[in-house]
Amino acid sequence: MVVATHRNAKLIIDRNALYKNILSEKQHLNKDDALFMVVKANGYGHGAIEVAKTAVKAGANGFCVAMLDEALELRHAGFKQPILILGISRVEDVQLIAKENISVTVSSLEWLKDAQNLLRSTDNTLKVHLGLDTGMGRIGFQNPDDLKAAIDYINNCKNLFFEGVFTHFATADEKDKTYFNFQLKKFKEFMTVVKVKPRYVHVSNSATSLWHSECNGNMVRYGVAGYGLNPSGGAVKLPYELYPALSLTSEIVNCKLVKSGNSIGYGATYTTNDNEWIGTVPVGYADGVIRKMQGFNLLVNGYKCPIVGRVCMDQLMIKLPTQMKTGTKVTIVGKSGDHKTTLQDIATYCDTIHYEVACLFTNRLKRVYIN
Ligand SMILES: *Cc1c(COP(=O)(O)O)cnc(C)c1O
C-alpha cells in the first residue's frame, strides 16, 4: 500500500510524549532493571523505527517484537540492542535468527531439539527465553518438569544459550487481583526448578509494571504505556502520568449545504432533517477509520461534528455546525479547541480496546514525527 503523501491526512507522532513515558517508566524501575520497549506491529501503529530511536534516547535497553521480520527491520535500521521475539519463530529460521543475534521465545523441548540440529554444524549460538504458561493459555511450558527438561537440554547444547525465562499475565490490568495472584503463584512454582537464574527474568508488560511492580523481575516488556495509553483503558489509576503520542488529523475537502430530506453515503442510512452543512473528509476504512465509527464525533474548530452516513473506503462525511472553508482542519484523534478525542474514546465507541484502534491505522496514512 502506498503512503499517501499528497493527501492532507496524517498521523502525528509526538516523540517527546514517547520519551517522557519511557523515562518515567525507567525512573519507576529499580536501577539495574532493564526496559525492553515493545515495538511489535509497527510500534503499535506509531512506526517501529522512530519509536525505537526515541526509546533508546529515553534509556531503553532492548526491544521486544512479535515476529522475526519485525526484529530484522530493527537490525537493518542499525539497532544493536538485544531484541526478543515474543511469538514462536519457525525453526527453519534459526540460523538467520542466531546470526542476527536475536533472542527467541521457546515453548517446547521439540523446538529446541530441532533448532540444535539445524545449528549443530555452525558456530552460531541461539539465545533462548523460555516462556511459561501460568494461565494465559497462549504459549509456554505447561509445568515445572517440562521446564526443567528444557533447561537441562539447553545446558548440554553448545549452540543454545539460556538467556531468559518469562511469563505473561492475563489480568494485570484489572482491579481484581485474584487471577493475577493465581498466575504469580504458578510462576513461583516454575521458578523453583530454575537453579541458576538466566540474565533476564521477566513477567511485566505495562500493566504488571504499573500496578504489580513488586514482581517486575529484572526486565520489563514495556508496551502500550510507552505510547501514552493506560493499559486498563482508564479503569485503574496510573502511578505516573502518561502522554498519548498519537494524533490523527485531516481536512475538509468539500463543504456544501444539503437541503432537508436528502440522504448521505452508501445505503442512504442518514437523511438530513433540516438544511445541513455537510463536509467531506478524505479518510476512510482503508486508513483504519472503520465503518463502526459512523456517528462518532470528529472535531472541527473545537466543534463536535458527527460522522453522518456510512464511512466509505476512502472518504467520510461529517455534519458541520456552519459553513466551513475547504482546507479546514479535522481532528480525528487529538485536541481541538476545548475538546479532545483519545484512542480510548474511539475504542469505547467501537466496543474494543485502544490497542486495536492504534493497530488499525494502515500505511496509507503518512506518519509525521514532531518534537
Ligand atoms: C505485547 C506484549 C507485551 C506488551 O504489552 P503491553 O500491554 O502493551 O505493555 C508484553 N509481553 C508480551 C508477551 C506481549 O505479547
Image (cartoon, rainbow, N blue to C red):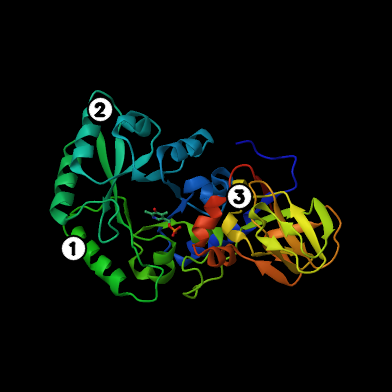
Q: Report crowding for label 3: few under 14, some 14 to 19, many 20 or more residues within 10 A (C-alpha).
A: some
Q: Residue at x 78, y 57 (%)?
A: 279
* CB within 8 Å, label 1 to label 3: no
- The mark found on residue 245 in the picture is none
Q: Is residue 304 above or below residue 74?
A: below
**Mark 3 lies on residue:** 285
Dot 2 or dot 3, earlier in sequence = 2
Q: Is residue 199 among the parts visible in the rendering?
A: yes
The residue that disc 2 covers is 118
Q: Amino acid at mark 1?
A: Glu
> CB under 8 Å between callouts 2 and 1?
no
Q: Quadrant of residue 17?
A: bottom right
**In the figure, is residue 50 to the left or right of 104?**
right
Name the mark nearer the viewer: 1 or 3.
3
Spatial separation of the CA atoms under disc 2 and disc 3: 44 Å
Tag 2: amino acid = Leu
Q: Is residue 77 left or right of residue 369?
A: left
* Residue on which disc 1 sits: 189
**Farthest top residue?**
121
Provide the secondary structure element on which disc 3 rests: helix
Amino acid type at circle 3 is Tyr
Image location of residue 356, percent across then percent down: 50, 56
> Mark 2 and mark 1: span between their CA atoms?
32 Å
Q: Are marks 2 and 3 in contact (CB under 8 Å)?
A: no
